[in-house]
Each structure stands twice: as structure tokens, then as C-alpha cells.
Image (cartoon, rainbow, N blue to C red):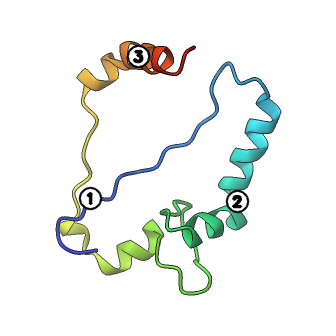
Amino acid sequence: MSDATPLPPRVITQTAGAASPASAQLFLDYIYSDAGQQVMCAAGMEASMNHFKPANGCTASLTELATHVPAKTTYLVPVSQDVVDQQKPITDRWNKALGR
């Protein structure tokens, strides 16, 4: 990475109407375990678990990134209320595009 490189968050969640909620929960439990974070890091995704210790020299973790980038040079982009207010229309458009 170099200056002004955006680091977009990757979000994963379980939907309220999941067909297999127990399977979805097992997946989330794995992703947020140390083993799951190691896999995410090895795949080049930013592991996000607090105090994560990457194995095999993996540097794709927010914890590791923070050791190289001074906090005063980091800017977290806030989510505006306008975007939050548009959640339903955005969800409806995605559902329509996905044929739901």
C-alpha cells in the first residue's frame, strides 16, 4: 500500500430470514475465531479481531496495519444519516436485482 490507499471494510452478517440460521451462525463463529481470522489474513483480507496475531508473516490485519500507519494519518470515513435512511430502498434494489 502507499499513501492515500483506501482500505474498505469487508462486512459479513447473518440475515434475519436466513434459510439455515444455525449454519449461518456456525460460519460467523468460524470467521471470527482465530482460525477464521488466519484464513482471512492469508487470503489477503483484513483480519479484524482485536489483538489478532497473524501467522506466517501475514500482514493483512488491522492490528498489523496500525503498527505501520500512524493514527494521525488515518481517516475513518463516517456513514452519514442520509445513507442509513436509504437502507430500505437500497435493500429493495438489491433484492430486485437478485430476483427476490
- Residue 38: x %, y % from top left: 64, 70
Foreground mark, 2 or 1? 1
Q: Is residue 21 left or right of residue 84?
A: right
Query: In what element is the residue under mark 2?
Result: loop
Q: Quadrant of residue 83?
A: top left
Mark 3 crowdedness (10 Å alpha carbons): few <14, some 14-19, many ≥20: few
Q: Amino acid at mark 1?
A: Pro
Q: Quadrant of residue 74?
A: bottom left
Q: Is residue 23 left or right of residue 17?
A: right
Q: Earlier in the sequence, mark 1 or mark 3?
A: 1
Q: Earlier in the sequence, mark 2 or mark 3?
A: 2
Judging by the rendered image, the residue that carries numbered circle 2 is 33
Judging by the rendered image, the residue that carries numbered circle 3 is 93
Query: In what element is the residue under mark 3?
Result: helix
3D distance between C-alphas at marks 1 and 3: 26 Å
Q: Amino acid at mark 2?
A: Ser
Look at 26% across and 52% down and name the residue there.
Answer: 76
- Residue 91: x %, y % from top left: 44, 19
79 or 88, which is in the foreground?
88
Query: In what element is the residue under mark 1?
Result: loop
Look at 18% across and 68% down and name the residue there.
Answer: 73
Foreground mark, 2 or 3? 3
Q: Amino acid at mark 3?
A: Arg
3D distance between C-alphas at marks 2 and 1: 26 Å
Judging by the rendered image, the residue that carries numbered circle 1 is 6
Q: Is residue 85 left or right of residue 100?
A: left
3D distance between C-alphas at marks 2 and 3: 33 Å
- Residue 13: x %, y % from top left: 59, 37
